[in-house]
Image (cartoon, rainbow, N blue to C red):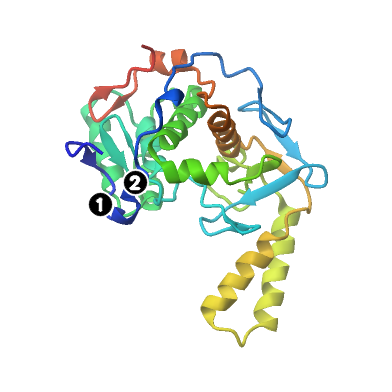
């Protein structure tokens, strides 16, 4: 990484090696409308912003919720909050995709928004950035943000793919037939069914299993019990229906397929270009 690049991830030196540049064959620009269905290798048509109902009896759903969720031996640390996949974008090192996404919510060319962006990247963690900094400034979010938030998220996650070999490897380690779902049943932020899916039957079954394990294996150490619970409750996946737009997992599957194909995902670059997005005073140019 260029030594002149400003770092936004001061506490993630252990992950710094993951931020090498992707090979040039993935750097061609694409500018097609996102309303087209994107078909991944399992035959699933992915359409962003569309409500979905996934039946785990007919598709191989891998739900993820926490950064330490383990499914069939794979740690599904796929959410934006995880800070083990830092990456470079716009000459800056980002410790998580969440913080870059949040900066897009406050991306007008104003001093007020620049100061909020600095607050976001100075917070203790990506979670703190979202809960406390965004929460404090919620009324100052761009009035038009909902018009481009999904395409912005797709662009942000793709930058993470470009900048983090470890994140690329993680996506490619997930079997082709897997349908990723961010499980957001208990989320209270108001956008759970936009970014993920709810499945109350699943949550109920997992809570019951966790209570059973705690009672049966009370003699285990805290660490061993936690590990056992993680594995056992994540093995419960084929219950109920997953309903929601599931946009973050769709974006991850789109990026996974693009990596496999050696192409870039379909991103509405014209839309993003039209929105005049400024990050720390610099306007991002999406169309060359």
Asked if marks 2 and 1 touch (Cβ < 8 Å), the reply is yes
Give the class, few, some or many, for how many residues have Cα within 10 Å of label 1's Cα (few <14, many ≥20).
few
Please, which residue is most extreme toward the left here?
4
Which residue is the site of mark 1?
Answer: 10
Residue 140 seen by the camera: no
Nearest the viewer among 271 and 89 is 89
Among the 4 quarters of the image, the one containing residue 221? bottom right
Expressed as whole percent of the image width and height from the top left, the position of residue 172 reads 56, 41
Name which of mark 2 and mark 1 comes first in the sequence: 1
Q: Which residue is situated farthest in the right direction here? A: 57
Q: Residue at x 36, y 11 (%)?
A: 288
Tell me the crowding category of disc 2: few under 14, some 14 to 19, or many 20 or more residues within 10 angstroms, Cα based. Answer: many
Q: Answer yes or no: is residue 181 visible.
A: yes
Left or right? Give the position of 222 relative to 89: right
Task: Using the image, tell me which numbered label, if any, was put on residue 95.
Answer: 2
- Would you place residue 248 above or below residue 267 in this image? below
Q: In the image, what residue occupies the spot 29% across and 40% down? A: 93
């Amino acid at each position: 990484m260029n030594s002149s690049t400003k770092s936004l991830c001061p506490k993630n030196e252990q992950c710094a090696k993951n931020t090498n540049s992707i090979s040039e064959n993935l750097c061609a620009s694409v500018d097609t409308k996102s309303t087209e269905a994107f078909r991944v290798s399992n035959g699933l048509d992915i359409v962003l912003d569309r409500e979905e109902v996934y039946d785990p009896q007919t598709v191989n759903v891998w739900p993820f919720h926490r950064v330490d969720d383990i499914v069939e031996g794979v740690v599904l640390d796929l959410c934006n909050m995880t800070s083990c996949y830092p990456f470079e974008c716009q000459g800056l090192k980002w410790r998580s995709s969440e913080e870059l996404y949040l900066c897009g919510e406050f991306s007008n060319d104003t001093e007020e928004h620049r100061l909020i962006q600095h607050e976001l990247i100075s917070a203790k963690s990506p979670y703190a950035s979202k809960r406390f900094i965004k929460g404090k400034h919620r009324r100052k979010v761009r009035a038009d943000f909902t018009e481009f938030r999904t395409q912005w998220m797709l662009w942000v996650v793709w930058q993470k793919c470009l900048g983090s070999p470890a994140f690329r490897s993680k996506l490619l380690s997930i079997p082709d037939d897997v349908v990723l779902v961010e499980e957001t049943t208990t989320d209270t932020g108001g956008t759970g069914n936009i970014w993920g899916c709810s499945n109350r039957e699943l949550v109920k079954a997992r809570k019951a299993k966790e209570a059973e394990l705690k009672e049966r294996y009370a003699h285990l150490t805290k660490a061993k019990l936690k590990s056992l619970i993680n594995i056992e409750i994540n093995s419960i996946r084929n219950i109920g229906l997953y309903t929601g737009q599931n946009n973050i997992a769709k974006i991850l599957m789109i990026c996974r397929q693009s990596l496999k194909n050696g192409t870039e995902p379909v991103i509405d670059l014209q839309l993003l270009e039209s929105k005049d997005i400024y990050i720390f005073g610099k306007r991002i140019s999406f169309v060359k």
